[in-house]
Amino acid sequence: MPISLDLWLAFAAAAAVLIAIPGPTTLMILGHTAASGWRVGLASLAGVILGDICAIALSVLGFSALLAASAEAFLVMKWLGAGYLVWLGIKLWRAPASAPTPVAATRSGMGKAIGQTFIVTLLNPKGILFFAAFLPQFIDPARPLWPQVIALTLTFNVIATGTQIGYIAVMGGARRRIASPHAMTWVNRAGGSMLIGAGLLTATLKRS
């Protein structure tokens, strides 16, 4: 095993607690699910996972040191991510209502969801700094670095995937019970509000 069992269990327990607390990415996934159904919600989750993997790689490679040292770099990434989320939320709020159908989750729509959530996750500087501060606590310096990083990355994403799928199932089930265009107008606005809220939450991030 690339990492000691004690360290792995401690990491899994800590990660489970942190992941259970809803943050900007959870609101983003719920917003996509409310607007377009559970398939697009799962596509959004795939984008977040890819973004997390890249964020972990960047933190290990030292990009986190730049964000920690440069207030300007941190602010640029933060405001780009926050602005993008708010823009997506406004677009969804203003989107025309349509009743949910099984074919609503097209390949293009799912691909767009993956791209959007990947960009937002990668533009979250707090995520890169979080992994830079969190992962080293569970790295054994006497063992090779990258096998441990890979093991911890897989563990984090498996736990995150299970948790987010639960959120998606609840939101997707609620959405399927709503069939009228009038009701879907409010579903779109709820999803848009979640995306805007995720953007505002991102805007409050600090470099500490």
Image: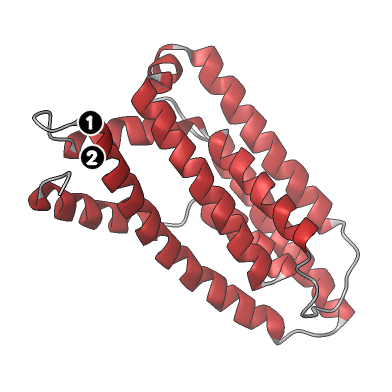
Element carrying mark 1: helix
Element carrying mark 2: helix
Residue for badge 1: 145
Residues tagged 2 and 1 counted as in contact (Cβ below 8 A): yes
Q: Is residue 123 left or right of residue 15?
A: right
**Image position of 132 with respect to 51: above or below:** above
Q: Amino acid at mark 2?
A: Gln
Residue 139 % position (x, y): 18, 35
Residue 49 % position (x, y): 49, 50
In depth, the one of 166 and 205 nearer the eye is: 166
**Image position of 106 with respect to 98: above or below:** above
The residue located at (77%, 80%) in the rendering is 102
Residue for badge 2: 148
Q: Is residue 134 left or right of residue 192?
A: left
**Image position of 145 with respect to 53: above or below:** above
Residue 179 % position (x, y): 81, 85
Q: Amino acid at mark 1?
A: Leu
The residue located at (65%, 69%) in the rendering is 39
Q: Quadrant of residue 140?
A: top left
The residue located at (71%, 65%) in the rendering is 190
> Where is the C terminus found, in terms of image quarters?
top left
Could you tell me how far apart the alpha carbons at marks 2 and 1 are, in whole angstroms? Answer: 5 Å
Q: Can residue 27 be seen by looking at this rendering?
A: no
Q: Residues within 10 Å of mark 1 (few under 14, many from 20)?
A: some
Q: Is residue 177 left or right of residue 157?
A: right
Q: Can residue 194 be seen by looking at this rendering?
A: yes
In depth, the one of 135 and 185 nearer the eye is: 135
Number of numbered discs overlaid on the protein picture:
2
In depth, the one of 93 and 103 nearer the eye is: 103
